[in-house]
Amino acid sequence: MSETKFIGFREDIEIIKMVDEVAEARGQDRSSFIRGAIRRVLADLSFLPENSKKALGLKEAS
């Protein structure tokens, strides 16, 4: 398992409320939802390998 590190950041309360609402609807906690969102953006920007993109359910680059 890879090493993890705690990070903190500030965000508008309305964004936090939306994140919490969507995370709950998906059966996730806030941290899991944000981790997934970060990974999807990194994959979209081609910073993750194709197998990681596939694991995230994203289409492979053509």
Image (cartoon, rainbow, N blue to C red):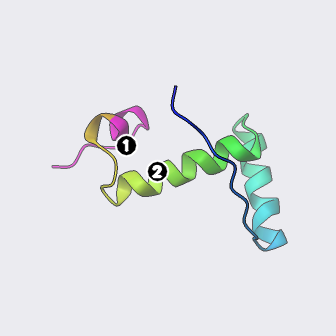
Please name the residue shown 37% across and 51% down the image: 43
Residue 40 circle label: 2
Task: Write the start and end of the magenta stretch as one range.
Answer: 52-62
Q: How far apart are labels 1 and 2 at the CA level? A: 8 Å
- In the foreground, 38 or 15: 38
> For residue 36, what is the image quadrant?
top right
Closest to the camera, between mark 1 and mark 2, is: 2
The three-letter amino acid code for the residue at tag 1 is Leu
Percent position of residue 21, x then y: 79, 51
Label 2, secondary structure: give it: helix
Residue 58 circle label: 1
The magenta stretch spans residue 42: no
Percent position of residue 15, x then y: 75, 67
Marks 1 and 2 close (CB-CB < 8 Å): yes
* Mark 1 Cα-neighbour bin, 10 Å: few <14, some 14–19, many ≥20: some
Please name the residue shown 44% across and 38% down the image: 56
